[in-house]
Image (tube, rainbow, N blue to C red):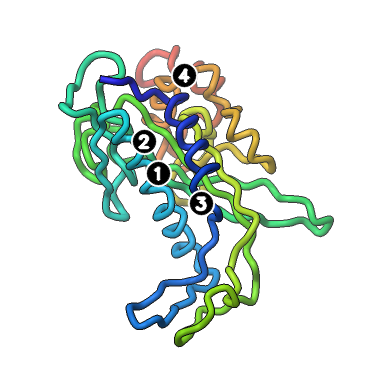
Amino acid sequence: MPILDFATFRSHFDKIVQKEVTSWEAVGFIAPGGTVYAFGTDSKVISTIFESISAPIIQQIAKQFEYVVESSPQTIYPDFTLSPEPIVLSGPHSRRIAIDIKTTYRKLTAQMLVKKFNYTLGSYTSFLRSPAAKKNIRYPYAEYSDHWVIGFLYTRREGVPAKVYHKPDPSKILCPYHDVEYFIQEKFKIVGTSPGSGNTTNIGSFATSDIDDLRQGKGPFSEHGKEVCDNYWRHYGRTAKDRKYSTIQEFLAWLKKPEGS
């Protein structure tokens, strides 16, 4: 069986995009009669567009390397599960691969510079704490050997409404976003040390204003590895008062303390 490792997947994905994806832009949904339902700037819908364009690329790569692809409902991790056929749950490069699609848009400063942005990368209070559990995840976390993220960054085109067009010329309908860029990276290499947003229990990626930082995997856990990253978030307090650490250095020091201290 051919081995599908991260570098191979990323290389193949990039090549297919260069050859087959003429644009990441879409303007709406088309009905059988020719009516177009333009979706405006709704970020959830735009995220679905990127996932829909990525899906056949992932399918194409998986087929070449003899993997079966399964997609998940919206609230179930990951967006895509790649499993070798037949499935073997032990040994190198033989377990399942999780691929998540993440999306955000640029925000600019008064000087028209890109503000720092980040992505939410899933809850740290569910399956990560119970690797054998099946809640909110397609298969138990312990069955996945790899976790990869395909992240999209775009600029919103303000003022483009959600609207119905009856038998229009699609070329004359304005796309609600532009300047699309993407990265593909191993999840632990983009994970940050604080939650993704507000009071949620979502892991956040590290904040940056340069998407190349994500392409290169310059996150704080890159030099420590996936196991340290998983353990950091597995023991991260659910609320601020429960937290014993907020940096990797504090976490490593906490690990050395006697249990219960």
| Disc 4 from disc 3: Cα separation | 24 Å
Q: Position of residue 208 (x, y in %)?
A: 65, 40
Q: Which residue is mark 4?
A: 225
Closer to the chain start, of discs 1 and 4, is 1
**Amino acid at dot 3:** Thr
Closer to the chain start, of discs 4 and 3, is 3
Task: Answer whether labels 4 and 3 touch (C-beta < 8 Å).
Answer: no
Which of the 4 image quadrants contains residue 35? bottom left
Q: Residue most toward the front? A: 19
Disc 1 or disc 4, which is closer to the eye? 1
Q: Which residue is mark 1?
A: 57
Closer to the chain start, of discs 4 and 2, is 2
| Disc 1 from disc 3: Cα separation | 17 Å
Of the 4 image quadrants, the one containing the N terminus is: top left
Task: Answer whether labels 2 and 1 touch (C-beta < 8 Å).
Answer: yes
| Disc 1 from disc 4: Cα separation | 28 Å
**Amino acid at dot 2:** Ile
| Disc 4 from disc 2: Cα separation | 26 Å
Kindly identify the residue that appears in the image at 57 percent across and 73 percent down. 171
Closer to the chain start, of discs 2 and 3, is 2
Helix or strand or loop: what does disc 1 sit on? helix
Helix or strand or loop: what does disc 3 sit on? strand
Disc 4 or disc 3, which is closer to the eye? 3
Helix or strand or loop: what does disc 4 sit on? loop
Disc 2 or disc 3, which is closer to the eye? 2
Q: Is residue 61 above or below residue 24?
A: above
Tell me the tag on residue 61: 2
